[in-house]
Amino acid sequence: MPSTNALHIAVLPGDGIGPEVMAPALEVLRKVEAKAGLSFRFTEAQAGANNYLATGVSIADSTIRLCEEADAILLGACGLPSVRYPDNTEIAPQIELRFHFDLYAGVRPARLIPGVPSPIVGAAERGIDFVVIRESTEGLFASMGKGVVTHEEARETLVITRKTSERLFNFSFKLAARRKARGRSGTLACVDKANVFKAFAYFRKIFDEVAQLHPDVKTDRLYIDACALMLVKRPWDFDVLVTENMFGDILSDLAAGLVGGMGMAPSADIGDTHAVFQPCHGTAPDIMGQGKANPTAMILSAAMMLDWLADVSGIEGAAEAAQRIEQAVDKVYASGLKPFEFGGSAGTVDVTRAVLDAL
Ligand code: ATP
Ligand code: MG
């Protein structure tokens, strides 16, 4: 945990468009640094598919040590379709980091920034502003690499533990209360499939237990299928959703689609001592190297990092800096900036320049 305003940030740009959007995020952090009374030290290291090709590991032990020592970790998207482990699984150091640091809470805000087109009728008028909290260390992903496949069948195992679920729900209730204090409804919805699977009934039972410790937070319980429908029909009714890993993986991409696309969706993977900040999107090989990647998600992830640092360390300047970045992003979209991602002609450099100017 940081104790001074000098903040050491581990920077892992990743693959594909990862480095293309990381550079803008660092420029934005540099821009707010002095005014916020902060001083950043960025230590860069390689992780991902290119690192695997060059060194034989996706993330070196020394890079894990760097991340352990840093106050926060900024990560670009990692992995490329053409590069795989010998067992044909994806190169995914972000998942290794989640397990290594026990980053159980994947926080994926979906906020429709005024001026950004949403495919949902009525969204511009009614607004979209909710957060999906995706459990990130177990659920169906606990089975990763452990599935059993024979010629006749394949099996994977879903794991829900009391320990992780309790921490996840406590985190979610606190976030819901914080959002209520900031003027949102503060309603927390548990999303599962408790009607079909015992594991999800157990998930919901623990949610109900933890809810009793947070009587001031309004709660809801939804099945994943109904939730998917409602998110498309009336996303403005939601504030905070908490769900299992696989469901959260899917819902957070759906949520990104509601608010303009992957390039608009920041995220954070948060544990009890460490946190990784990374946009929801992947390495987007279809647009890499063309200057078309939207850096907004990465820039907003950097703002989430500042907000988290403020929360865990009490550094006031960091929370203000986070707000300034969000306001600058809002300003550029309100003024009509249209990235390639939604049919415009603003490339990575243009979006970055506009945000820096607004700051
Ligand atoms: P992963 O498996 O790593 O999640 P993915 O297969 O889901 O990756 P993404 O890399 O997230 O795919 O890309 C999905 C689509 O969104 C692609 O068409 C990609 O070009 C687009 N996209 C993703 N990120 C951005 C961005 N920052 N700016 C513009 N378009 C993006
Ligand atoms: Mg994806």
Image: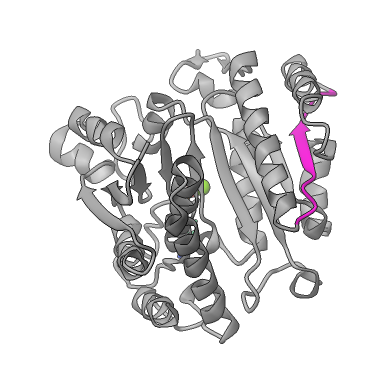
Q: For the view shown, which residue lies furthest in the left direction?
A: 54
Question: Going by the image, does 299 lie left or right of 243?
Answer: left
- Where the N terminus falls, by quadrant? top left
Q: Is residue 109 above or below residue 57?
A: below
Residue 281 visible in image = no
- Where the C terminus falls, by quadrant? bottom left
Give the image location of residue 48, x and y in percent: 28, 42
Front-most of residues 7 and 236: 7
Q: Is residue 334 above or below residue 209?
A: below
Tell me if residue 248 is in the magenta stretch: no
Question: Which range of residues does the magenta coloring cover?
Answer: 184-195
Residue 19 visible in image = yes
Residue at 36% across, 80% down: 353
Q: In this view, does 149 lie above or below 288?
A: above
Residue at 68% across, 29% down: 169
Give the image location of residue 112, x and y in percent: 66, 66
Give the image location of residue 165, x and y in percent: 64, 22
Front-most of residues 37 and 242: 37
The image quarter in which residue 242 lies? top right
Question: Going by the image, does 358 lie left or right of 238?
Answer: left
